[in-house]
Amino acid sequence: MAWCFALGSVCFLIGPIPAYAELVGAAADAATFFIGSILFTAGGALQVKAGGGRAARWAAISQAIGTVYFNVSTFRAMQVAVSSDTYDHRVWRPDLLGSICFLISGVIAYQRAGRRGWQPAVNLLGCVFFGASAAAGYVLPATGSMVSETVANVNTTLGAACFLACAVPGLRSSRTSDAPAGGPG
């Protein structure tokens, strides 16, 4: 589970960096996000199976649903240009719904954890960054451009860095926690 979240986080960490996109090209950059979303979904599925208490289960389920929305949005982003009049419907809406699911999951995990450890707070912060990224990624119909591509990219990278920070301790430990703090949500 930690490996899935860590590798997925790395994909979302490097994907928005303009130098990376220029180096690998638009198609490979879009594929990086899609691969990252698949890794998040695999981690989320493992987290749902890991069980835990009722709150942990609901957080993991909400997170898993969010990752499926990201699968849809990142897959469609490989096929639909930002300038397309269907971008908001086909790409942005699933991205927004995935971000909402992550926020719900992050809040549940944070509330459940109380004041134990740093991971639930950092994880929730990552969820907030992903939500801000989704909001900034909305394509304005009047101009055909995103609200702010820079804000979307920076927040995606910051969110991924938070998720990676939460996943790394799990790479060093074979123990599993019942709190969904190993990755998004």
Image (cartoon, rainbow, N blue to C red):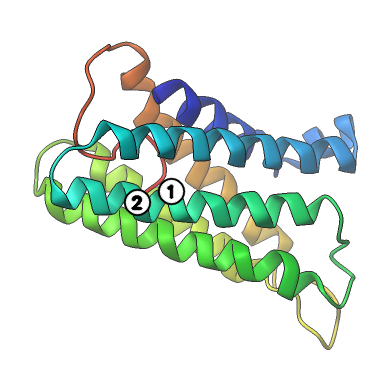
Three-letter amino acid code at the position of disc 1: Ala
**In this view, 6 is above or below 87:** above
Pointer 1: what residue? 64
> Disc 2, disc 1: CB below 8 Å?
yes
**Residue 146 in view of the camera:** no
Q: Nearer the viewer, residue 77 or 129?
A: 77
Q: Residue at x 15, y 50 (%)?
A: 54
Q: Nearer the viewer, residue 174 or 172?
A: 174
Pointer 2: what residue? 61
Please state the horizontal and vertical placement of residue 23, each as a whole percent of the image: 87, 30
**In this view, 78 is above or below 161:** below
Give the class, few, some or many, for how many residues have Cα within 10 Å of label 2's Cα (few <14, many ≥20).
many
Three-letter amino acid code at the position of disc 2: Ile
Q: Residue at x 63, y 71 (%)?
A: 93
Please state the horizontal and vertical placement of residue 147, each as a whole percent of the image: 70, 74
Q: Residue at x 34, y 44 (%)?
A: 123
**Residue 168 in view of the camera:** yes
Q: Residue at x 58, y 30 (%)?
A: 10
* Label number found at residue 134: none
Q: Nearer the viewer, residue 26 or 102?
A: 102
Please state the horizontal and vertical placement of residue 52, each as a whole percent of the image: 17, 38
183 relative to 58 in the view: left or right: right
Query: Considering the numbered disc 2 on the image, is that residue within a helix, a strand or a loop?
Result: helix
